[in-house]
Image (cartoon, helix red, strand yellow):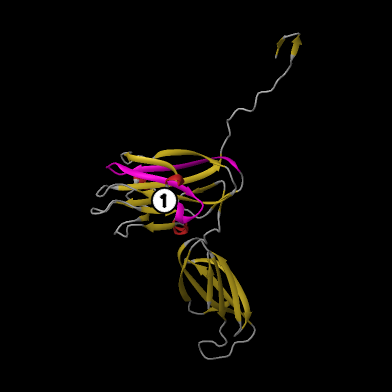
Amino acid sequence: NYTLNGLEGRFNVELPSKTMGDTPLSGNVNLDMKVDGNHVKTASGEAGTIVPLEYTFTGGNHEVSFVAWVQNGDKQESSDPIKISVETHELAPEQLEIPFTITPTEDEFRWCTVINANNDGQTWTYKTSGTPGDEPCFAYRYDSAYPADDWFVLPLIDFDDTGMYELTFDLATHMRAETLEVSLADDLNSIGYSESKIAVYTEFSTGREWQQKKVNLTINATGKKYLAFHAASPRNRDYLYVKNISIKHGENNTPLLPSIAEINLDGGDGTI
């Protein structure tokens, strides 16, 4: 049997206790493990025992195979392979730590919450082709009958300090004008409130060219917040694309208080 926890896999493989000719095996039996046809590990154990193997995958679909073998003089006697298919994904973080960038990868898209508020047939998806530059991104496609009312929300973001932060992201449209709203809120129920909106792009078009947008944030209290992107275009428009969402600590360019260098008084007159 096997277990998967994000990208981590653990496989418990029982070594054969007999040959194909039904002769009992004794002593050590070796076990080769391959992932996608590439040898990654060799283990060994007593015939008939269970050997545990652990492996860290990349995200995606993989074929894992195991072959048992023994050395018989100068000859290596090998079993037929056993094969299993696994699908692995990077576990969502409990929270995003600043600074961060969401590209997104397919796993990063899975971390996000997608809300189809009007329950029509369209909402945000992960798209890797047919986008500007064929770059992976969050993509919203229009509905011919209903206006857009769809959100994607990043995992909780930990604002561990007060002060200035800088949000940047790349934004593109297809051919027609679109509307996008960006919100920052303490909970999911508040993302739609007007006071949660930090940026609104109304009836804009980029003509399939990426444009970087920047929003300066002032955080007055530490805590965790949700960053949400809301497709709000009228019906029968086109595509909205978002990628490379990043938050980092910003620079506070507010001047410090002035200071008095010297005071000279002479009766009622003086200089400061």
Residue 80 position within the rendered picture, expressed as x and y whole percent measured from the top left: 48, 79
Name which residue type carries label 1. Answer: Gly
- Looking at the figure, which quarter contains the C terminus? top right
Q: Is residue 241 magenta?
A: no
Q: Is residue 61 above or below residue 49?
A: above
Q: On the image, numbered disc 1 is attached to which residue?
A: 192
In front here: 12 or 176?
176
Q: Quadrant of residue 182?
A: top left
Q: Is residue 18 visible?
A: yes
Residue 105 position within the rendered picture, expressed as x and y whole percent measured from the top left: 45, 54
Residue 234 position within the rendered picture, expressed as x and y whole percent measured from the top left: 28, 47
Q: Quadrant of residue 23?
A: bottom right
In front here: 64 or 30?
64
* Secondary structure mostly seen in the magenta stretch: strand
- Determine the residue positioned at 47% across, 41% down: 168
Q: Is residue 179 above or below residue 31?
A: above
In front here: 203 or 88?
203
- Determine the residue positioned at 56% across, 46% down: 99
